[in-house]
Amino acid sequence: MDKILSFHNHSEKQIKTLIKKIFQNENWAKAFLKDSHHGFVHGNQVRLSCLKLVDKLNPKEKSQLLKEGKRIGQDHPLEYALFSIEIAAIFHDCGRFNRDGKVVSEEQNSHHILGAKRAKIFCEHLGLSVLVPYIKEAIICHDFQSKERTPGLSAPKTIIGKIVQSADQLGWFHPDSLPRTLDYNKALGVKFFDPSISLKERLVWKPTYTPKDALTVMLYQLFGPTSKDRFGIESARQKVEGYKPELEKNIIKIAKAFKVEIEAEQLIASFKKAYALR
């Protein structure tokens, strides 16, 4: 129990030190700790977002969180649950980095599996294997958006998993998330706008596909589903709707910088029309 309380009170710097110590000779960990797209910076942001969501849980959600914590340990159930949430948040995207520390597009669709394995190693080194089932489920399910758009993934069943998923998915809709989207796609060699991509191709794009241009990804951020399966926490569903107007404005700003403002506006209008018919 002391280990759990110790971690829960750790600062960002102390958590990074633990990761360095446990994975000291591994290139993926070095890249993960430096990267700001899907690395430690992002993981820590999701961790902090998770803790904010915990503070806003409704009574039913709070009760479920305590029940899950008690299944792990009766003595300090909330601390067990919070620790599981924090570890899952930190490690949820670490699988995007292969063993050489590189982000390779072909491996992105299995990043949740590799991330869960690395989180398991982390917990075992701390003597906290009892937390692994909850952390594994949260990481495996964090990218689920809908059965149609993320086939092969399932929505989390635990409140621990729902908190991690909701916090991470909120980041997709946040108006300030677009530079991260742009930088990540640039790292994959994807340009901002490709005029050869048809509207039909853009409309059927899924997160499991290799991006054809960053603008399509941003349009998906703007028009993606916001159902309970994607946002299992009530306060997250309420919050995400408020992000959309500013997110749309920021997409236009970035498009303007690339001198394709008119094209972006036309695509947004076409997406609105297409989604209104669904």
Image (cartoon, rainbow, N blue to C red):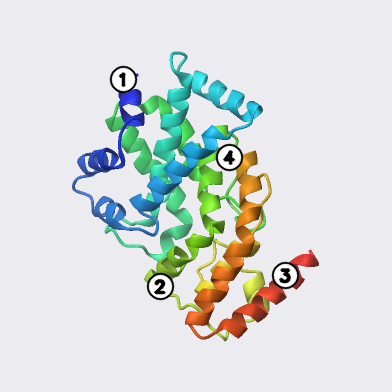
The Cα atoms of the two marked residues, 1 and 4, are separated by 28 Å
The C terminus: image quadrant:
bottom right
Q: What is the total number of numbered labels drawn onto the structure image?
A: 4
Give me the disc on residue 65. none
* Circle 1 SS class: helix
* Circle 4 SS class: loop
Q: Which residue is painted at 76% across and 72% down in the image?
A: 273
Q: Which residue is painted at 48% across and 81% down in the image?
A: 257
User: Is 124 above or below relative to 101?
Assistant: above
Q: Residue furthest top?
A: 75
User: Is 250 above or below relative to 7?
Assistant: below
The residue that label 3 is drawn on is 272
Give me the disc on residue 2. 1
Instruction: Estimate how packed mark 3 is, as few (under 14), some (14 to 19) or many (20 or more) residues with alpha carbons within 10 Å.
Output: few
The N terminus: image quadrant:
top left
* Circle 2 SS class: helix
The residue that label 2 is drawn on is 186
The residue that label 4 is drawn on is 156
Q: Earlier in the sequence, mark 1 or mark 2?
A: 1
Q: Which residue is painted at 39% across and 59% down in the image?
A: 37
The amino acid sitting under disc 2 is Lys
